[in-house]
Image (cartoon, grey):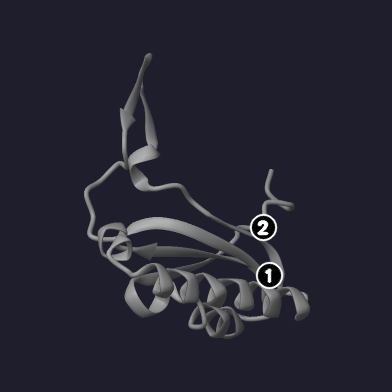
Amino acid sequence: MKYLCLLYDNEVEAAKMSEADQAAEFQEYIALTERLQAAGKMVSGGALQPVATATTVRVRGEQVLHTDGPFAETREQLGGYYLIEADTLDEALEWARQIPAARSGSVEVRPILDTANLG
């Protein structure tokens, strides 16, 4: 089953990290990605641009609304994701706990809905 691991962290706090700490954390992400790939569990992943670059789209009847930024003010922002293949939720959670964002923010793990047999 595929699981989406959504990485949330506080952009303001992350920006306060020293360049050396940022580089060390980036190397942790690279190492985790390599472990996922070696285990055959990596489907895809990526980091997002800062939340200030986001545009939210809402459709209300015939009206289309575009809003700069995220849809809600939060302490943590979505910063990236891993899409992984895992045999069980427990396995997906084990991979998620290794994501550096879990130490300072959170990692939301959600199974991907299998739509092959729908409609």
Q: Which mark is residue 1?
A: 1
Front residue of 1 and 97: 97
Q: Residues within 10 Å of mark 1 (few under 14, many from 20)?
A: few
Q: Residue at x 38, y 33 (%)?
A: 55
Give the quarter of the image for residue 19: bottom left
Give the quarter of the image for residue 75: bottom left
Q: Which residue is mark 2?
A: 114
Residue 119 on image: x %, y %: 69, 43
Q: Residue at x 74, y 52 (%)?
A: 116
Closer mark to the observer between disc 2 and disc 1: 1
- Give, as a three-letter code, the residue at label 2: Asp
Circles 2 and 1: CB distance less than 8 Å?
A: yes
Question: For the residues marked 2 and 1, what is the alpha-carbon distance in whole angstroms?
Answer: 9 Å
Identify whether 109 is placed above or below 73.
Answer: below
Q: Residues within 10 Å of mark 2 (few under 14, many from 20)?
A: few
Of mark 2 and mark 1, the one earlier in the sequence is 1
> Horizontal placement of 119 versus 62: left or right?
right
Residue 39 on image: x %, y %: 75, 81
Residue 17 on image: x %, y %: 32, 69
